[in-house]
Structure formats: C-alpha cells, structure tokens
Amino acid sequence: MGRTSDAQNKILDAAKMLIEQRGYSALGVAEICSTAGVPKGSFYYFFESKQALALTVIDDHWAAQRQQWVELLSSDHDPLRRLRDLFEATENVQRTAQQKAGLVVGCLFGNLALELSNQAEEIRDRLQEIFAAQIDLIERVVVEAKDLGLAGASIDTRDTARSIVALMEGRALFAKLLNDPAQLEALWRNCLDLLQVPAQARAN
Amino acid sequence: MGRTSDAQNKILDAAKMLIEQRGYSALGVAEICSTAGVPKGSFYYFFESKQALALTVIDDHWAAQRQQWVELLSSDHDPLRRLRDLFEATENVQRTAQQKAGLVVGCLFGNLALELSNQAEEIRDRLQEIFAAQIDLIERVVVEAKDLGLAGASIDTRDTARSIVALMEGRALFAKLLNDPAQLEALWRNCLDLLQVPAQARAN
C-alpha cells in the first residue's frame, strides 16, 4: 500500500473509534469518511472495501497491543507479577477509554469475534490468529510459573492460558455492559485460582 | 399485546435466527419479514420497532433459558454436580445449534451485549438484568457448596459466581470464533479452580 498518508490515518482513526462505539455492521463508508473529514473518493484509493479497512484496523490494533503484551510479559518481574501487570494494564486501557469517551469500549477483538464470526471468513481467520497469539504469550509465562513451582504442578499450561484469555474476554464483556472498568479487577484473583497457586504463596 | 398469533411467532423465530447468525445491526425489518414469510405490514401490527422486537426476542430466550437453569441448578444433585450439569447443558445447546445450522451461535445475550451496550440503552438495561439474574442463580449454588465445605472456605460467593458467568461468556466466544462447542468443556475444570475445590474432592 506504500507510504501511509495523512488521509489514510484519519480514515483508520475514525473507523477504529466508530467500530469500538457501534460495531462494524452499523457503519457505512460515507459515515467513516465524514467522521474522518476526508472525501469519500479517497476511501477507495486506500481501501478496497469496508472489510479491508476493518482488517487494517484489527492489524494496527493488534500490533500496538502485542507490543504492550510482549513488554509486560517479558519484563524482569516474576511470572505471576507479569500476569498481574498485564491485567492492570488491560483495566487501565478501559479506564482511559472511559475517561475519554464516557464509555468502556471493551475488547475490539472480542466485539468483532461475536459480531462477525459467522459472516466474514477473513475477519474470523485473523481474529483466530490473534487469540492464538495471545494464548501463546500467556502460556509462556504460565510455563515459567509452573517450572518455578509458583503454579500448581498438575495444571495443563495450554488450557490454563486459554482460560485466562477467555476470562479476560468475559470480564471485558461485563466491563462494557456495566460501563465499569472495575469489572476487570477480579482477573488477578481468578488467575491465581486457575493457576492453582497455593494460598501461602498469594500474599503479594 | 394479547394472544400470540402465528405471524407474530414466525417473526420472532426468524428474528432470533437472523440475530444469532448476523447480529442486530445488520438486519432490516424487510429481511426479517421475508424470512418469516409474513407481509411487512404485519410487522408493525405486532412490534413498534426493530428494537421492540429485539427486546421480545431477548425476553423469550431468557424465559426458556431461565427455566432450564432453574431446573438444573435446583435438582437433587449435590451443588458441584448441578454446576457441571449446567455447563454440559450449555455445551449441548451450542452443539445442537451447530448440528442444525452448521455454526456455533454463541450466547445471544453476550453477542448483543458487545454489539449494542453503547448504543441501545433499553437493551443494555435488559441484558444487565439478565446477567445479574444468572449470577444470582449460580451464587445460590456456590453458597450451598461453600456451606457444605465442598468449596474453599475463603471464597467470595458473589465474586466467584460472577467469574463463573464471565468464563461461560469467554468460552462461548471461543466456541463461536472457532466454531467448536468443545471449547466449553473446560468450564467444569475451571469452575473447580475458581471454587477452590481441594484436589482430593475432585475425583467425580
């Protein structure tokens, strides 16, 4: 697609904001362009279709989020603390969005997964890859915690990582439904349960 | 609204199927009526608006699901077994939908919560009530399990019940995204963790 232009960025920003607020189906290209302040003609110069735009929004959002996840999950902190850092950062993202727009926006990937899984094969494929990558990143830390004896010796690391991501999505759903970022606070306690961390190791 | 007519039921069935497949925003009244095989004029005889229809779909679905939840969660089985029965029934609902339509439809309430929370106040309110009622039903069983010493003595019953429902939603999201009802199988194992059930009590 060559060099990213200002108009392209404006379209991407407007699309992300509108998709977070109202989902994908409710939007039209004309509205995206008018929110972005660019002429409708320029849309099709940058994007083949509304779906192509959605895929770029998804990829951009994952590139930024992945960087944050990798930084937090590969820090010098012990594995359990790294997971806690991730949950706190996730809650902060929702809190910041709420302060800015008045509304908890939830997880862009979860929102689109439920809205589009059964209608847009290419978007479903991309979201499957992203969730698999999230589970991979979490699993590495779970393996470390298990190897260090910080987590239960009998946990299935893959399944536990998948459950942690599922719980993040479920709690993000409640945060959005109740417009309440504090719904994400339980993630840390629940994660300790799913990791079967013994009571005496939970002091921190 | 008086006696339910055949045309009204046809509209409700078609709307439920279409909302499960494609969400709310992507649908128009004309498509709902053509799928239902009723003239468009009759739609507004029964429903004030598309949103009024969606609320009726939600209420009907919850009436049926609530009945199933109450039956399973107040059976003669011990509390943990009753929770397991609920998870199995939930997985079976998704499996049956997949066999019928080829697709896991996910949770109607979760789907609509993520799609509409920030756009349709009345739907958001209704979904908040339904999730609160689900958490109530689960909490009663969690309290029983705790009182019987089947669950950890230090768990917060309300918070644990909320986490169980959040996990059901997160796993339903994966089931839909991957078109794989088996994603719900982990609920039972995860629930034992969240309830802090001791290892020696997990044999069943």
Image (spheres, coloured by chain):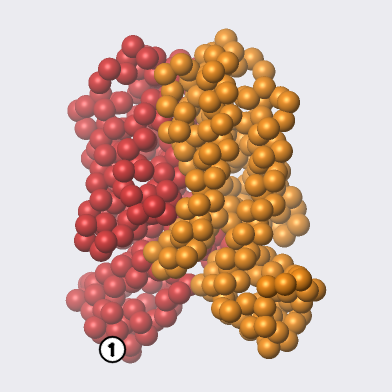
Chain colours: A orange, B red
A105 lies left or right of A196 = right
Image-quadrant location for residue A86: top right
- Where's the C terminus of chain A, which quadrant? top right
In the rendered image, residue B162, in percent from the top left (x then y), is placed at 47, 37
Residue B112 can be seen in this image: no
Q: Residues within 10 Å of mark 1 (few under 14, many from 20)?
A: few
The residue located at (67%, 22%) in the rendering is: A78
Q: Is residue A33 above or below residue B179?
A: below
| Residue A114 coordinates in the image, percent (x, y) | 46, 58
For the point 65% across and 57% down, which residue is it? A61
Q: Is residue A99 left or right of residue B35?
A: right
Task: Give the x, y percent position of residue B63.
Answer: 30, 54
Q: Determine which residue is flagged by label 1.
A: B39
* Chain of the residue on which disc 1 is drawn: B
B69 w.r.t. B26: above or below: above
Question: What x and y, as percent, mark residue B84?
Answer: 29, 32
Which residue is nearer to you in this view: B139 or A57? A57
Q: Amino acid at mark 1?
A: Pro
Q: Is residue B63 above or below residue A142?
A: below
**Number of marks present in the image shown:** 1
Q: Please state which of residues B97 and B67 is positioned toward the viewer in this rendering.
A: B97
Q: Nearer the viewer, residue B1 or A49?
A: A49
Q: Secondary structure at mark 1?
A: loop
Residue A3 visible within the image: yes
- Farthest residue in the front direction? A2
Task: Tell me what residue is drawn at x 58 percent, y 16 percent.
Answer: A148
- In the rendered structure, the answer to whether residue B60 lies left or right of residue B118 reads left
Picture quarter with the N terminus of chain A: bottom right
Residue at image position (67%, 40%) is: A70
